[in-house]
Image (tube, rainbow, N blue to C red):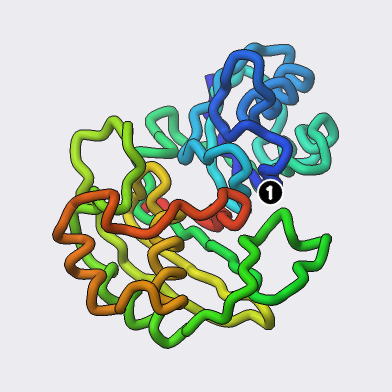
Amino acid sequence: MRRIKLTIAYDGTGYCGWQKQDGAVTVAETVENAIRKLTGEDVELLGASRTDSGVHAMGNVAVFDTESPVPADRFVPALNSFLPDDIRIAASEEVPESFHPRFDAHKKRYEYRIFVGNVCPPMRFRYVHHLRETLNVDAMREAASYIVGTHDFTSFCAAGAQVKTKVRTVTDIQVTKDGDEIVLTVEGDGFLYNMIRIIAGTLVNVGLGRTKPSEITGIIEGMDRSLAGPTLPAKGLCLCKIWYS
């Protein structure tokens, strides 16, 4: 038995997230169907990140076990021939059977994109959150600096998350301008349910002048979801990269 690691990119618009669900079209199930067509095997993908409905990815990672003789690097063109155009296998390699895509990851990078302007171009609306109001980027950068570090991120976690601890380490947040888009790039050892989208909503509140940058510390220490900003729409979020030791 061999374990194959896939790096997967997808446009999440047409999918009910990564995780398989009864009666719903998901990324994991679509990739599993492609593997079945290629190898004749019923496999179960083990993914690194269970992205929500509408969230995109450039570098999600998953593994599956197979007895197929297909060379590891040839799974890229072979699987892509069975996949829809909005899901692509970007890389494939053989890894030890002990490799776990979620537990062995030590850092992830997400981007959240905000288009600022009166009219969002139709070729971009699937990948950005559209705001018409001007944002104070300098204030957002100052606020982001308070989020970096190891904290209990209860205030930035959606209700119902079933985790042992809500302590996470955010190693870096960058707030940059890319033309008429503002890009939030967040890196850390792991993230809670909706954490990035709530961070983005909180920083937007800062950019709009509704929250002062200095209030971020109190929001974190309050450990109360109602203190932080709104959960921004999924379509602006993209899982960019996962690092392994």
Please give the name of the residue rendered at 74% of the width and 59% of the height, measured from the top-left corner. 125
Q: Is residue 183 left or right of residue 91?
A: left
**Quadrant in the picture for residue 103:** top left
Please give the name of the residue rendered at 51% of the width and 55% of the height, measured from the top-left corner. 232
Residue 171, above or below 60: below
Q: Is residue 150 left or right of residue 141?
A: left
Question: 177 or 47, which is in the foreground?
Answer: 177
| Residue 179 in the image, given as x and y percentages of width and height | 68, 82
| Residue 4 in the image, given as x and y percentages of width and height | 57, 32
Q: Is residue 222 left or right of residue 171?
A: left
Which residue is farthest left? 221
Q: Residues within 10 Å of mark 1 (few under 14, many from 20)?
A: some
Q: What residue would you read off at disc 1?
A: 90
Query: Which amino acid lies under the numbered mark 1 shown in the image of this protein?
Result: Ala
Question: 83 or 71, which is in the foreground?
Answer: 83
Instruction: Count the numbered circles shown.
Output: 1
**Quadrant in the picture for residue 140:** bottom left
Q: Is residue 77 left or right of residue 71?
A: right
Residue 4, above or below 239: above
Residue 129, above or below 35: below
Res 72 visible: yes
Please give the name of the residue rendered at 40% of the width and 39% of the height, measured from the top-left corner. 102
